[in-house]
Amino acid sequence: MTDTLLIGERMYSSWSLRAWLLFDQFDIPVDVALAPMKTEAFATALAAFPPARLVPTVRLGGKVVWESLAIAETLAERYPDRGLWPRAPDDRAVARAMSAEMHAGFTALRQACPMNLRTAFSNYAPDPAVSADLQRIEALWSLPGPRAAGPWLFGGYTIADAMFAPVAARIAGYRLPVGGRAEAYVAAHLGHDSFRRWRAMAFAGDRPMALYEDIGLDRAPWPGPAVMPAEAVAEGRAENAACPFSGRPVAPDSLALFGDRLLGFCNPFCRDKAVADPGAWPALVTLLDQN
């Protein structure tokens, strides 16, 4: 039986992002299904995953597990050699505490700055409650144990980093004031290949939702890495016969230009996620590197 992760819209669902990052980062296979938020279809989708009431939820080997932190712990138990938690016991204890605090706290930041990966906003001014959350977050990110080596909290990427990925997106997207150490950690998330793939799929598959888009703030460019220019095209002859993602035959309605290279994909979703951020997809990068 194939495991299935049920998510909300990638552009806005911060809890779905946390769970999916663990599957992608640690190379754990899973099918993904969408429960469209704020629609009747949301409840219909969840009905197939009892007793879950919210996303994300995942069916693992026939058993439904809901809540992001429970999903993370279950994956860590199932794949003990993947390093989802830090290997050192002291680091692992701190990582668990940080993840639990993220799961339960920072309500002011989460309510005032809903995640939107489509754009940044230029004129948001944090109130005292949000500022207090930011101060606490910076204090956690600056603990003596974490950040000893590498860009991530405990050297290598762990569950704790996935838990804070949407916080990094909020700090970047709302241009929230943080110190240089925190800025570097935010930049690591924005440049993280798994994060970039999630965002690219958001552009490929999500509908805009006014609840997150029409919030009365001026828009600004997204502050992540520069993206290679690409565009979908209606016609042409692709140089490749098989989709670089699925291996299935190229479809005539799924073509895109990458510079002067015309490539084909098996469906419009594969095409559009490639166009949104070509550099996030190793198989595509390999194809583009070929002469």
Image (tube, rainbow, N blue to C red):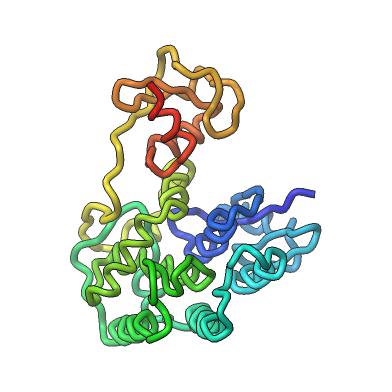
User: Residue reaching furthest top?
Assistant: 237
Q: Position of residue 177 (x, y in %)?
A: 22, 75
Query: Which image quarter: residue 7?
Result: bottom right
Q: Position of residue 114 (x, y in %)?
A: 39, 67
Q: Who's the residue at 73% across and 59% down the image?
A: 59
Quarter of the image with the C terminus in it: top left
Instruction: Judge whether 89 appears above or below 20 on screen.
Output: below
Left or right of 124 on screen, residue 251: right
Q: Position of residue 4 (x, y in %)?
A: 69, 53
Q: Position of residue 77 (x, y in %)?
A: 70, 70
- The residue closer to the viewer here, 39 or 82, is 82
Left or right of 207 on screen, residue 184: left
Left or right of 279 on screen, residue 61: right
Left or right of 135 on screen, residue 94: right
- Specify whether residue 38 is in view: no
Q: Who's the residue at 24% across and 76% down the image?
A: 178
Query: Which image quarter: residue 58?
Result: bottom right
Q: Who's the residue at 60% across and 63% down the image?
A: 56
- The residue closer to the viewer here, 240 or 132, is 240
- Specify whether residue 279 is in view: yes
